[in-house]
Amino acid sequence: MKARNVALLLTAALAVYLFLLADRAVALLRTGTAAGVALGAGVLVLPLLGVWMVVATWRSGTHIQRLARRLEAEGGLPETSELPRMPSGRVDRAAADEWFEQRRAELERYPDDWRHWYRLAHAYDLAGDRRRARATMRKAIELEALESAGR
């Protein structure tokens, strides 16, 4: 099953869960008691946060996918299939660190090119630093948007 189909299936399941949670919140609000109204208001916040998180995640994913398609069309998508892997399938740590240093050096030469930010984000991901990978990918998305707007 493709990753997108899995994401759609999980999003649908989450939507059902959030709907049921919102229904419970409304039921608590309708009790009219102070405790019920307070709990209902608190529970109602959870589905709202859930919807916000789903929308933000899907937006980010579509932006990243758009960048990946552009890079693929340009022939610049990061190639990591030759890197040595551990039995778990993860890239060997030393190889990931070396690959990361190469991407960072490229970025230092071209700091305003979103392509190099994208590759560095991929390198962070390979190295297991998801927080920096996300922040770096956001920078790539911002730079690509500026480039597209300037066309």
Image (cartoon, rainbow, N blue to C red):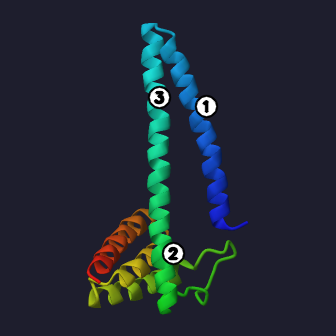
Residue 20 is tagged as 1
Q: Mark 2 and 1 residues: CB-CB less than 8 Å, in contact?
A: no
Q: Quadrant of residue 18?
A: top right
Which amino acid type corresponds to the residue marked 2 in the rendered image?
Leu
Packing grade of label 1 (10 A; few <14, some 14-19, many >=20) is few
Residue 75: horizontal and vertical position, in percent? 50, 92
Judge whether 69 appears above or below 136 on screen: below
Element at badge 1? helix
What is the secondary structure assignment of the residue under circle 3? helix
Is residue 85 left or right of 42 when viewed as pictured? right
On the image, numbered disc 3 is attached to which residue? 44
Query: For mark 2, does the 10 Å Cα neighbourhood hold few (<14), some (14 to 19), or many (20 or more) residues?
Result: many
Q: Which sits in the foreground, 122 or 102?
A: 122
Residue 122 in sight in this render: no
Residue type of the residue flagged with mark 3:
Leu
Q: Which residue is mark 2?
A: 126
Q: Residue at x 45, y 77 (%)?
A: 67
Image location (x, y in percent) of residue 133: 42, 69
Q: Residue furthest right?
A: 1
